[in-house]
Amino acid sequence: MPAMAADAQSAIEISNAWTPALTQTRVDTPVYMTIANRGEEPDALLRVRCPVADFAEKHVTDRGEGGLAMREVKAIAIPAANTVMLAPRGTHLMLLHTKQALQPGEAFTCSIVFQKTGAISVEVTVASGSAEGKP
Ligand SMILES: [Cu+2]
């Protein structure tokens, strides 16, 4: 039904998308954001595509004996009527093989694909301060 499709598209709201500044290229760097699911159906973040990097993955951060370690996951669950924070030392997106330096105040647009909602364009702002190589 068309009405259901419209509801599904408006269920996911993304805010505060940002990435640390980056002086190098050909490195990996995290992207953070807040993802709210206003709908009554669970959704999942499946894929990310950003123009400033060759690839992007979904990562979770594990706390082990040696400190923090990142691990790739197939999807990030976005439960119904819930908000998921992608934040430092937690779940995040990871750009792999960046193509350009990222200056504070710059922005770029990523396409993020959700299982139910489909693709959403998100503007990611480059924050000041560097977190190169950190989860
Ligand atoms: Cu990572």
Image (tube, grey):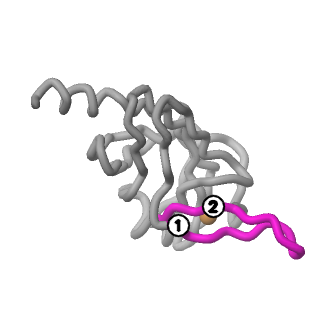
Residue at 46 percent of width and 59 percent of height: 75
Q: Which part of the image, by quadrant, shows the C terminus? A: bottom right
**Residue holding disc 1:** 73
Q: Amino acid at mark 1?
A: Val
Residue at 66 percent of width and 46 percent of height: 87
- Residue placed most toward the observer, 108 or 36: 36
Which of the two discs, 2 and 1, labels the residue nearer the N terminus? 2
| Residue 38, percent from left and from top | 43, 26
Residue sticking out furthest to the left: 1
Residue 93 against residue 4 in the figure, above or below: below
Residue 134 against residue 33 in the figure, above or below: below
**Residue holding disc 2:** 60
Residue sticking out furthest to the right: 65
Which stretch is magenta? 57-73
Residue 91 against residue 124 in the figure, above or below: below
Residue 58 covered by magenta stretch = yes
